Amino acid sequence: MATNLVSYMMQFLTPDMIGRMAGALGLNRSDAQSGVGAVVPALLAAFSGVADKPGGAQSLVNTVRQQSGVLDNFAGMIGGNNQSSFIERGSSLLTSLLGSHDQAALTGAIARFAGLGQNKASSLLGMLAPVVMGLIGRQIGTRGVDIGSLTSLLASQKEQIADALPSGMGELLDRTGLSTGLAQAGRATTTATDQFRQYTPPPVRERPSRDTTFGIPNAAYWALPLLALGGLLWYLLGRPQQEQVAQQPAPQAQSEGVRVGGVDIKNAIGDSISDLRTSLQGVTDVASATAALPKLEAAKTQIDKVSSLVGQLTPDQRKIVAGVVATAMPTINRLTDRVLEIPGVGDVLRPTIDPVKTKLADLSGQHGTVGSGR
């Protein structure tokens, strides 16, 4: 299928709908946008992994078939009396498919990436799991959902799912083992097992006898314990001050808005990057590039506006904005590199994409990585 499944789902989850979800879950708009942008490809990655396991594809088929009416009622459910039961139902579906251990690992990965906290991440996953499954069913066609059609769809989307995972999200999912189904998509990742194997503990060395000092003069050899003692005293005497510094509460500015002239810069840049990412994910040829151009131009206009206001920010506020942009840059670079390699698309989109990447690089402080697809 030519449709990009992630883009298809993000088009269903409109900015207005995400704003309502944010209010219903007690999140600010930027955090909700980041959370949704992480949850959708993460769930698809997890479902792809389930489909690759013995018996997993049939379980997933059965669950997808049960979500046929979810999409029509979802907008009305947000913030309504049935929201809690809907979220609980979605969480139960994930438990049945992933198991409680993997579900907890997925929740932890989302919480860490989006900074939502475990409870908010769990609620967002529970809210979106039925929607993602319902959209899978709608894309295939309810009557045609079977093992063959489902596994074929997910297999065809592995590269797009890998591209859509925000920077850092893939590594977190790899540590849970949930995104192993994306390995053949060529995504460069490191699993927790690999990280463990890469660590080689230093060999335990036997204490030398007085006659064997490894060529070290006796005076220097016996001076080593004195040096160690001096280091211990330094550590003990310096520790209270270090602990006082370490125990200072982390600044809360990251979770707050960054406002200039009534404009929330953090939310504005977050929304623009999300629109940019969603539009790029849907580009597969010249026709789709032409269709995406108005949204890309709108995102460019908003990013230009944000860039013009940065001079009025405090240094701490600039760091917050830079952090938001820097987190998204590897994904934006990867998507733009892919899109511009499509024959004919560069002529349509490059005049818009290149200035946008330059502005984003300036905002993030990554002036040297504009052309990088890392």
Image: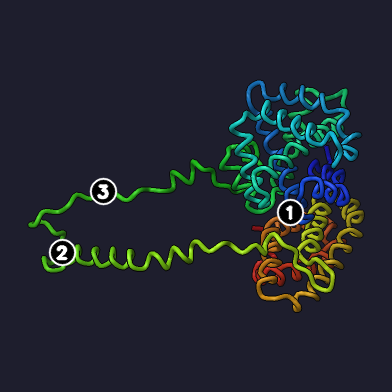
Q: Which residue is mark 3?
A: 204
Q: Quadrant of the N terminus?
A: top right
- Label 1 environment density (alpha carbons within 10 Å; few <14, some 14–19, many ≥20): some
**Percent x, y for residue 313?**
73, 75
* Secondary element at tag 1: helix
Q: Quadrant of the C terminus?
A: bottom right
Does residue 12 show up?
yes
The residue drawn where x is 72% and y is 62% is 256
The numbered dot on residue 31 is: 1
Q: Earlier in the sequence, mark 3 or mark 1?
A: 1
Q: Earlier in the sequence, mark 1 or mark 2?
A: 1
Along the line of sight, the residue nearer the viewer: 11 or 21: 21
* Secondary element at tag 3: loop
The residue drawn where x is 74% and y is 36% is 126
Marks 1 and 2 in Cβ contact (< 8 Å): no
Q: Which residue is mark 2?
A: 221
Give me the C-alpha separation between circle 3 and circle 2. 18 Å
**Percent x, y for residue 231?**
28, 66
